[in-house]
Image (spheres, rainbow, N blue to C red):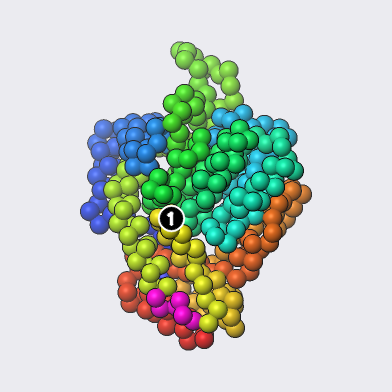
Amino acid sequence: MKEKIFLSSPHMSEEGYEMKYIQEAFDTNWIAPLGANVNNFETELAEKVGSGYGAALSAGTAAIHLALKALEVGEDDIVFCPTLTFSATANPIIYQKAKPVFIDSDYTTWNMDPECLEKAFEKHPNVKAVIVVHLYGICADMDKIMEICNRHGVPVIEDAAESLGAYYKKQHTGTFGKFGVFSFNGNKIITTSGGGMLVSDDEEKIKKVRFWSTQSRDQARHYQHSELGFNYRMSNIVAGIGRGQLKVLDDRVAKKKYIYEYYKRELGSLEGIDFMPDNEWNDPNYWLTVMTTRGKVTPLQIMEALEKENIESRPVWKPMHLQPFFEEYDYVGTGVSEDLFEYGVCLPSDTKNTDEDLDRICRIIKSLF
Ligand SMILES: *Cc1c(COP(=O)(O)O)cnc(C)c1O
């Protein structure tokens, strides 16, 4: 069997930064509960993206959940959410017993279509919050989306789980709305093995999120609780990995971009092949290189050919409004997400891939045409 090529796997720093921070935690016995790594990771990440404050949590999903809670999203409230995303964007809406309304993508950004968003506001004027996603590290059209949401006075949560290192008009994704969410899950551009971060300029809200995430313990000698608590805090060991990974984020973005350009150069002229959008205001992190294939070769044929050679690839996210679990909720759209799901394929975008690996992948794909 040929050596496995992953879609996107953990890539620790060559310099060993992560181990240094973990060692510090061991040396000071700050294995738990919190400690310097958690505080410093919050500060360093917030600084990197240009946000005021960060709350380090156990997952990006937890960050979305507590952002919704901080916006007082509750039973039967409506939350607009992109349909083309990973289910982790939508699930926390259900945790809060609220109702998602799914919004379609446009071809310009593959993300939330501002026109569909406008239509959704006409249909559901009483919206509590809007979640925007920057899928695959491509930026949503934030100027238009923020203008619409501000005009309606509705707060925005940016699910930037896939877009750490991606900038819209030179401003980091996750800093346009009231809250931004990052994920350090195993296949994201940097990883802590699992973890997330909520960022905001609102210090009070971030403090409140840290409080909720540590079981809502009131200031008292005994265990006193006047609010519902969650066990969502990031550990000091995990945060150490995050601090080390943050140091190599720029290198990872550069390599991801190199991979994207490699594929585009090698495969771009094949019949029916197109790549994810590249807008002039967009500095993506190229987390995954995604292409569409509308010619004689289908995404399934490409995925199967790669799989035979022990190479991972995957379809574009299946839209939420097509998921059995979310079937009952409203959807406003024109069919773009369904089309991208049908014709899209995510290419192996692992930053450890060598030119040889990329060449091997491209040869297999070319042989199908
Ligand atoms: C990975 C991901 C999340 C969830 O992050 P976790 O840290 O795995 O909970 C949320 N939204 C999107 C779009 C993601 O890709």
Q: Nearer the viewer, residue 88 or 109?
A: 109
Residue marked by disc 1: 282
Residue sticking out furthest to the top = 221
Residue drawn at point x = 40 percent, y = 55 percent: 283
Q: Residue furthest left?
A: 15
Give left or right: position of 187 versus 326: left
Q: Is residue 150 magenta?
A: no
**Spot occupied by residue 311 in the image (x, y as percentages of width and height):** 46, 73
Range of the magenta residues? 265-270
Question: Does residue 302 lie above or below 333 as drawn?
Answer: below
282 or 67: nearer the viewer: 282
Q: Is residue 266 magenta?
A: yes
* Number of numbered discs: 1
Q: Residue at x 62, y 29 (%)?
A: 72
- Asked if one can make out residue 31 in the rendered structure from this viewpoint, the answer is no
Q: Residues within 10 Å of mark 1 (few under 14, many from 20)?
A: many
Q: Residue furthest right?
A: 328
- On screen, residue 307 versus residue 119, left or right, reads left
Relative to 29, 343 lies left or right? right
Residue 139 drawn at (x, y percent)? 48, 53
Q: Relative to residue 292, is residue 354 drawn left or right?
A: left
Decide if residue 339 is in sight here: yes
Amino acid found under the numbered disc labelled 1: Asn
| Image quadrant where one finds the N terminus | bottom left
The picture places residue 21, in percent across and down from the top left corner, at 27, 42
Q: Residue at x 41, y 52 (%)?
A: 166
Q: Secondary structure at mark 1?
A: strand
Up/down of 78 relative to 360, above or below: above
Q: Name the residue rendered at 28%, 54% in the picture.
A: 13
